[in-house]
Image (tube, rainbow, N blue to C red):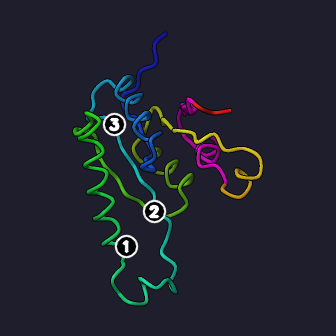
């Protein structure tokens, strides 16, 4: 049975794996407008230099990320996709967004970290798997060990 979905969430981290996830979403979505590209930013630290100087705000970051998401979507034939920028813990925000959108599928690119690197960096894909309200497709990195 072929995989298809009416609402597909694609977390975007702007790595090369993001393009592969968009391509996979285009393959399974019934319509490109049902694809949601989401980027989750970590909260600003109240003591970071940009915040103290007043030139870095959530609004300026959101605007810059939205512009980058728009360009990425256009570059990969997904300009009809819906865009979202959230602030928080990536895995949890992605799962919460999927629930709010009543998603059928989340397509998560995996960076294939393991061992000590994964211990320190954590795994967004793993957290999405644990908290997602729907099916999750984790794309294996082509050069994963």
Q: Which residue is mark 2?
A: 41
Label 1 sits on a secondary structure element that is helix
* 10 horizontally vs 76: left or right: right
Instruction: Mark 3 or mark 1: name the one nearer the start of the chain.
Output: 3
Q: Which residue is mark 3?
A: 35
Q: Which residue is mark 1?
A: 58
Magenta residues span 122-142
Q: How many numbered badges does the structure rendering display?
A: 3
CA distance for labels 2 and 1 = 9 Å
Instruction: Mark 2 or mark 3: name the one nearer the start of the chain.
Output: 3
Q: Is residue 103 above or below residue 89?
A: above
CA distance for labels 3 and 1 = 24 Å
The location of residue 120, given as percent across then percent down, is: 71, 58
Quadrant the C terminus occupies: top right
Instruction: Mark 2 or mark 1: name the one nearer the start of the chain.
Output: 2
Residue at x 74%, y 54% (from the top left corner) = 119
Residue at x 55%, y 29% (from the top left corner) = 142
The location of residue 17, given as percent across then percent down, is: 47, 39
Frontmost residue, 85 versus 96:
85
Label 3 sits on a secondary structure element that is strand
* 114 horizontally vs 139: left or right: right
The answer to whether the residue labelled 2 contacts the one labelled 3, judged by CB atoms less than 8 Å apart, is no
């Amino acid at each position: 049975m072929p995989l298809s979905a009416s609402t597909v969430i694609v977390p975007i981290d702007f790595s090369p794996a993001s393009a592969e996830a968009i391509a996979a979403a285009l393959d399974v979505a019934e319509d490109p407008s049902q694809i949601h590209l989401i980027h989750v930013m970590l909260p600003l630290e109240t003591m970071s230099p940009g915040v103290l100087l007043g030139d870095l705000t959530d609004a300026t970051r959101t605007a810059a990320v939205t512009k980058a998401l728009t360009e990425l979507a256009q570059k990969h034939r997904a300009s009809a996709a819906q865009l979202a920028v959230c602030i928080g813990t990536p895995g949890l925000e992605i799962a919460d967004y999927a629930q709010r959108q009543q998603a059928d599928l989340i397509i998560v690119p995996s960076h294939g970290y393991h061992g000590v690197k994964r211990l320190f960096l954590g795994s967004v894909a793993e957290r999405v798997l644990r908290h997602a309200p729907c099916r999750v497709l984790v794309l294996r990195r082509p050069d994963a060990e």
